[in-house]
Amino acid sequence: MTSPSRDPLHGITLSALLTELVARHGWAGLAQRVPIRCFQHEPSLKSSLAFLRRTPWAREKVEALYLESLGSDR
């Protein structure tokens, strides 16, 4: 039997993570916190997901923001 994952991102899709961040901060707030073009110019969920899936450094920044926001909820 395996122990449950301690990774707070385990089981959370990138789409769900990004959707929650947009709901919390809006695209403009997200662009301020993570200044990448896909959030700043004509943002959409589809284009942002495509960019984040092929750009590891950007995805790490978005995941870090998500984890930070989880900590502020407690």
Image (tube, rainbow, N blue to C red):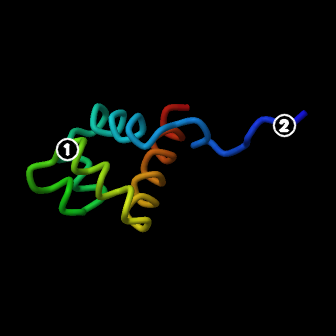
Pick the front one: 28 or 37: 37
Q: Residue type at mark 2?
A: Ser
Q: Residue at x 47, y 38 (%)?
A: 13
Residue 35 percent location from the top left of the image: 24, 62
Splitting the image into 4 quarters, where does residue 55 fall? bottom left
Q: Residue at x 28, y 38 (%)?
A: 22
Kindly identify which numbered label has been placed on residue 60: none
**Compared to 25, does 57 lie above or below?**
below
Q: Residue type at mark 1?
A: Trp
Splitting the image into 4 quarters, where does residue 51 fall? bottom left
Residue 28 percent location from the top left of the image: 17, 47
Q: Residues within 10 Å of mark 1 (few under 14, many from 20)?
A: many
Q: Residue at x 27, y 39 (%)?
A: 25
Q: Residue at x 58, y 36 (%)?
A: 11
Q: Which residue is mark 1?
A: 27
Of all residues, the one furthest to the right in this rendering is 1
Residue 7 percent location from the top left of the image: 66, 45
Kindly identify which numbered label has been placed on residue 3: 2
- Residue 1 is left or right of residue 40, and the answer is right
Q: CA distance from mark 1 to mark 2?
A: 37 Å
- Residue 40 is left or right of residue 58, and the answer is left
Q: Residues within 10 Å of mark 2 (few under 14, many from 20)?
A: few
Pick the front one: 59 or 51: 51
- Quadrant of image for the C terminus: top right
